[in-house]
Image: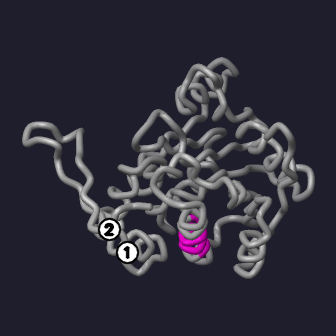
């Protein structure tokens, strides 16, 4: 068991910036903490990784991580801010250089439906492949990225022209990486980026009997519901709010 699970988290001061039109900074912080507590609750049941490392600049997140038995490493912020790929590279290099990680799996805070089984599935796939990717549900993005060896290929979340999934697979082919597994999972691929995702998250948490989670309790306060914009279109929605989002 030489695989490390790596969890980069943006500082609470600029977390989930795409939702700033929905919530105040304080509410965004509360949402982030709710998602983090839910993720750590799931991961305490996952035993297939040698270590779980949380990488963040915010002491509140790092203290919570340590209290759950994770390794907490403080990210040093720079001016201008580093790209997401640079942050991923920094954390990956820490895992390799300081912990001798042979393989690494990146997961992210807002994958709120992910299950214990998902993590075991991904770990098993990585033991047989060089690259494991779980595509994001709502975009040509990536929700989980696993690499063996850990430095087999850089990440391509910050490609200026291509979505991360397309860029990552294109580069893998160029580098002659042949052992690639695509992990097809709705629960591991659903993330929260925009307002519509919040309403879908609320509905899916209900469907998967995850109403006990901190994230569901946070969203439940806003009385969200979703309806089709018209009878013939399943791709356009209108969002109803019993309580207006801040």
Location of residue 83 with respect to 205 vertically, above or below: above
The circle on residue 221 is 1
Element assignment for label 2: loop
Segment tinted magenta in the rendering? 32-40
Q: Is residue 87 left or right of residue 112?
A: right
Asked whether residue 242 is drawn in magenta, I would say no
Residue 176 appears in the rendering: yes
Residue 150 appears in the rendering: no
Q: Residue at x 69, y 54 (%)?
A: 10
Location of residue 231 with respect to 118 vertically, above or below: above
Q: Main secondary structure of the magenta part?
A: helix
Q: Are marks 2 and 1 in contact (CB under 8 Å)?
A: yes
Q: Is residue 13 left or right of residue 57?
A: left
- Badge 2 crowding class, 10 Å Cα cut-off, few under 14, some 14 to 19, many 20 or more, is few
Of 126 and 93, nearer the camera is 93
Q: Residue at x 27, y 67 (%)?
A: 242
Q: Residue at x 15, y 37 (%)?
A: 233
Q: Can you tell which quarter of the image residue 226 is in? A: bottom left
Q: Can you tell which quarter of the image residue 42 is in? A: bottom right
Percent from the top left, x then y, of residue 46? Answer: 60, 71
The circle on residue 243 is 2
């Amino acid at each position: 068991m030489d695989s490390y699970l790596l969890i980069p988290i943006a500082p609470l001061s600029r977390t989930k910036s795409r939702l700033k039109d929905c919530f105040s900074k304080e509410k965004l912080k509360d949402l982030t903490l709710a998602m983090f507590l839910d993720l750590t609750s799931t991961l305490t049941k996952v035993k297939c990784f040698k270590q779980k490392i949380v990488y963040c600049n915010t002491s509140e997140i790092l203290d919570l991580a340590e209290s759950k038995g994770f390794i907490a490493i403080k990210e040093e912020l720079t001016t201008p801010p580093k790209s997401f790929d640079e942050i991923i590279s920094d954390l990956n290099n820490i895992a390799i250089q300081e912990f001798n990680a042979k393989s690494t799996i990146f997961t992210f805070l807002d994958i709120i439906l992910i299950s214990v089984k998902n993590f075991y599935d991904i770990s098993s796939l990585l033991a047989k492949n060089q690259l494991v990717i779980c595509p994001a549900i709502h975009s040509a993005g990536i929700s989980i990225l696993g690499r063996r060896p850990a430095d087999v290929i850089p990440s391509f979340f910050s490609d200026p022209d291509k979505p991360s999934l397309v860029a990552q697979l294109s580069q893998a082919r160029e580098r002659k990486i042949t052992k690639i597994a695509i992990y097809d999972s709705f629960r591991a691929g659903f993330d929260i980026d925009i307002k519509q995702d919040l309403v879908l998250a609320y509905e899916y948490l209900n469907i998967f009997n995850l109403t006990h989670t901190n994230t569901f309790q946070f969203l439940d306060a806003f009385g969200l519901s979703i309806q089709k914009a018209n009878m013939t279109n399943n791709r356009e929605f209108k969002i109803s709010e019993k309580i207006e989002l801040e």
